[in-house]
Amino acid sequence: MLVEMEVKSVTLQMYEDLDRALKKPLRERHWGMVIDTRKCVGCNACAVACKIENKLPPGVVYNVVIDEEFGTYPNVARRFISRPCLQCQNPPCVPVCPVNATYKRPDGIVVMDYDTCIGCRYCISACPYGARSFDFGNFYTVGQTPEVMPWDVMPSFEYGEEQQRDPRNPWRSPIGNVRKCHFCLHRLEKGMLPACVTTCIGQAYIFGDLNDPESLVAQLAASPRAIRLKEELGAEPSVYYLL
């Protein structure tokens, strides 16, 4: 009962933080995330939820859970590192794009313009976190079953627009484009938390406005346990990890 009450209170607080942030002008928000590695059990529910929410095809991954063993024998331990796009404030992927197809929004989310992307994949090479994928136009059931299954061609609604992948039209966006996590922007603008956050069974994900000192995410990001990956590169990620 205590565990259920704790999970509910954290979720409710995140929704209250989200509602407060959405009432602010876009430029005054800074969406961010804190992931508690002590609570992550490596179930991969977040990765599955992301796949389903964004209707991601084979080879396109927005969120992965990395299984890490650390320490020196016999004093070793294991932890899981969930890695969405870290939404860098100085994103190395942005300046290398020759057509400005990837850019940072005023609220800190790094996004893709599928209609502009030419598929050069420079941004994939530039990302130090391996957080970008290329859509080669693959389907789970094309060529594998007698007919294409309906769920394999269901549209996603990334960026608030219907994204329809069509096996009969192999160069229709987002096929041929680079794709990445965008903090479920289409959900955020409807007042909903990202799919990975609401699916996590251990409440390891905390999401909200880093510019709001009263938000849970801002308080946890200021914790002495909080770190950012490869911080020495100066990319200024918006995702923090609690060790």
Image (cartoon, grey):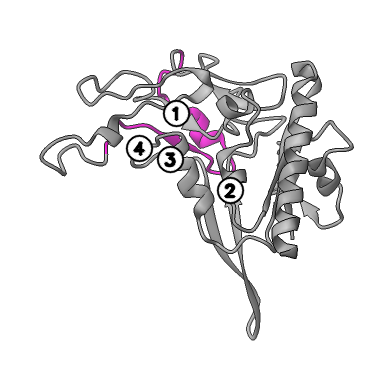
For residue 48, side relative to residue 187 (left or right): left
Callout 4: 10 Å neighbours few (<14), some, many (20+)?
A: some
Point out the frontmost of discs 4 and 1: 4
- Disc marking residue 57: 4
Q: Residues within 10 Å of mark 2 (few under 14, many from 20)?
A: many
What is the C-alpha distance between the residues marked 3 and 2?
Answer: 17 Å
Residue pictured at 49% horizontal, 34% vertical: 124
What amino acid is labelled 4 in the image? Pro
* Nearer-the-camera pick, 108 or 156: 156
Q: Which residues are magenta?
A: 116-139
**Earlier-in-chain disc, 3 versus 2:** 3
* Dots 1, 2 in contact, CB < 8 A: no
Residue under the point 72% across and 23% down? 107
Q: Which numbered disc, 3 or 4, marks the residue that appears first in the sequence?
A: 3
In the displayed structure, does residue 232 sit left or right of residue 124?
Answer: right
Image coordinates for residue 59, horizontal then vertical, percent: 36, 42
Q: Quadrant of the N terminus?
A: bottom right
Q: Tell me the distance, in whole angstroms, between the alpha carbons under discs 3 and 1.
A: 18 Å
Which mark, residue 52? 3
